[in-house]
Image: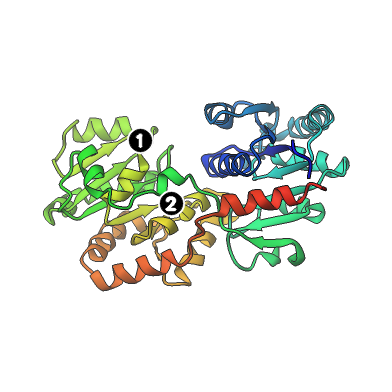
């Protein structure tokens, strides 16, 4: 490997792709400080803001995903793909990377395909337990495929699979001894049992409906709730409930300090995105997962089932959540034995150093 390796990291579209990508980049810099890293994302997507904020250069491709249920909106997609592959080829010619990393998302397809045409070694980081179509196709020429779940030989060449787990933001999972700090920040009582509800930055309608419908039951048991609604739902919920609905209830559009929210909670209710699950395994608290039904190949349900199989989480179907979620959460809060079992088992599924392991695999691809 030369002293100044050049690496392109491609992908994005959601935080679930972007945060692992940045974690890998940070690990590469920690191991090889002189390496040059260029990100390639999709124009108009959140990586175009998040990646520069993390200190890295990014170039955007004019690419988007297939729009389900609209033939008209997909008419221009072939032209976007062709244009993006051409731009990716030019980026590779200009930057001259020694290796390429694909983390999933719209931009990774054209970039990895271009890398394959130029015979540049590339690594795929597949976050989910059910691989997407793009990664399955591109895996045929991948040098290494880093995965987070067992059974991925159903999608990829078995001889190139390495189970590494998903990289997480280290600051998010650093919660030891911080319960009181979390409670203080959120103006809650650290001695009261607390439920954290998070549907991601955009929010989850089902989770919000379930909590709003059964707030009375939560308050009746003197339980606190940290309720992250997401930006689409926050205004309506606050208008209906009022700014200071009850001392036990914290309604927040977004959690800027997720680590302290994790630290202050006793039970966590969440969607089942792969990145979130990776964090929850390191947090080691009892978890109820409500997979989103609005994702490709229903992969969140498959992610959640991988934990359920190990007695490491409770799964509630989206359709059942509005009526059963809060009752199950309150029951779990009061079941010390089950809570302890779930905490122990989810902790066994954690990969604390996934970013470093993947970074080392990327550097191995670069010839001495």
Q: Earlier in the sequence, mark 1 or mark 2?
A: 1
- 269 lies left or right of 7: left
Discs 1, 2 touching: Cβ within 8 Å: no
Q: Residue at x 34, y 60 (%)?
A: 285
Q: Secondary structure at mark 2?
A: loop
- The disc placed on residue 233 is 1
- 158 lies left or right of 314: right
Q: Residue at x 33, y 49 (%)?
A: 262
Q: Is residue 210 visible?
A: no
Alpha carbon separation for disc pair 1 and 2? 16 Å
Q: Is residue 243 visible?
A: yes
- The disc placed on residue 112 is none
Q: Is residue 58 above or below residue 157?
A: above
Q: Secondary structure at mark 1?
A: loop
Image x and y of residue 336, in percent: 24, 69
Image x and y of residue 155, in percent: 71, 62
266 or 322: nearer the eye? 266
Q: Residue at x 68, y 27 (%)?
A: 60
Image x and y of residue 288, in percent: 36, 59
- Which image quarter: residue 63? top right
């Amino acid at each position: 490997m030369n002293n100044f390796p050049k690496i392109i990291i491609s992908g994005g579209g959601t935080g679930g792709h972007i945060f692992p990508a940045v974690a890998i980049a940070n690990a590469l810099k920690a191991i090889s400080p002189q390496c040059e890293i260029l990100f390639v994302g999709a124009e108009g997507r959140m990586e175009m803001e998040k990646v520069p904020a993390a200190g890295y250069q990014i170039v955007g491709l004019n690419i988007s995903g297939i729009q389900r249920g609209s033939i008209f909106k997909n008419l221009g997609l072939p032209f976007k793909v062709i244009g993006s592959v051409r731009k990716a080829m030019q980026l590779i010619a200009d930057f001259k990377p020694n290796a390429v990393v694909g983390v999933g998302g719209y931009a990774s397809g054209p970039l990895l395909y271009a890398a394959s045409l130029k015979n540049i070694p590339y690594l795929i980081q597949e976050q989910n337990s059910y691989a997407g179509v793009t990664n399955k196709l591109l895996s045929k020429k991948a040098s290494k495929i880093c995965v987070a779940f067992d059974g991925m030989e159903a999608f990829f060449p078995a001889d190139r699979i390495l189970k590494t787990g998903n990289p997480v933001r280290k600051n998010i999972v650093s919660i030891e001894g911080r319960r009181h700090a979390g409670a203080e920040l959120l103006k809650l009582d650290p001695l009261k049992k607390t439920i954290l509800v998070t549907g991601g930055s955009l929010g989850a309608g089902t989770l919000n409906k379930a909590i709003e419908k059964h707030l009375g039951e939560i308050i009746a048991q003197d339980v606190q709730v940290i309720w992250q609604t997401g930006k689409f739902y926050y205004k309506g919920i606050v208008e209906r409930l009022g700014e200071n609905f009850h001392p036990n209830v914290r309604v927040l559009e977004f959690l800027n300090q997720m680590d302290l929210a994790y630290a202050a909670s006793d039970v966590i209710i969440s969607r089942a995105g792969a990145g979130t699950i990776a964090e929850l395994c390191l947090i080691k608290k009892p978890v109820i997962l409500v997979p989103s039904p609005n994702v490709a190949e229903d992969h969140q349900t498959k992610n959640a089932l991988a934990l359920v199989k190990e007695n490491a989480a409770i799964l509630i179907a989206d359709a059942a959540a509005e009526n059963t979620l809060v009752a199950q959460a309150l029951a779990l809060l009061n079941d010390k034995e089950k809570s302890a079992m779930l905490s122990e088992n989810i902790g066994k599924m954690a990969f604390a150093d996934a970013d470093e392991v993947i970074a080392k695999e990327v550097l191995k691809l670069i010839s001495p």
